[in-house]
Amino acid sequence: MGIQLMGLSQAKQKLQRSLSARIASLLATSGTNNVPKGHVGVYVGEKYGEKKRFMVPISYLNHPLFQDLLNLAEEEYGFDHPMGGLTIPCSEDHFTGIASALSGS
């Protein structure tokens, strides 16, 4: 039980650090909030300029597979990335495979 809570806490901290000011800035410049309630927008792709935006349910953030993606993003970009939002540096196929597995669990 304590291990799961620690994982959730770590995921929450990563999300707060990486999204807080960046998402607010992005939403202010776009003028609209088109992220459904209970979701977070992420950019996925390996090449700059060829990233696709996905809406991910917040419930995915505490899953170990998604936490691995968050760790990969932290290693690649740190917490300051020019896209302005959470960017995951993996192939679109890899990300959709993980998202598909998470939606079935």
Image (cartoon, rainbow, N blue to C red):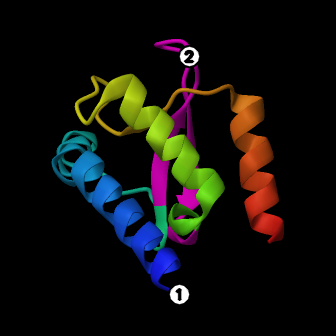
Q: What is the x, y in percent for residue 57?
A: 57, 66
Residue assigned mark 1: 1
Percent coordinates x, y for residue 45 in the rendering: 58, 24
Residue 23 can be seen, yes or no: no
Among the 4 quarters of the image, the one containing residue 82: top left
Q: Is residue 60 above or below residue 76?
A: below
Judge the density around disc 2: few (<14), some (14-19), many (≥20) Cα neighbours within 10 Å: few
Residue at 25 percent of width and 42 percent of height: 26
**Count of labels shown?**
2
Whole-number angstrom distance, CA of label 2 to CA of label 1 = 40 Å
**Which residue type does callout 1 highlight?**
Met
Regarding mark 1 in the picture, which secondary structure is present there?
loop
Q: Give the image quarter of residue 59.
A: bottom right
Label 2 or label 1, whichever lies nearer to me, is 1
Specify the segment rendered in magenta.
Answer: 40-59
Q: Where, by quadrant of the figure, is residue 37 drawn?
A: bottom left
Q: Given the image, on which type of amino acid does mark 2 rest?
A: Glu
Question: Residue shown at 80%/54% (left/top)?
Answer: 100
Q: Which residue is mark 2?
A: 50
Q: How far across and down, in percent of the image, does residue 65 sit?
A: 65, 53
Please give the name of the residue rendered at 68% of the width and 25% of the height, measured from the top-left corner. 91
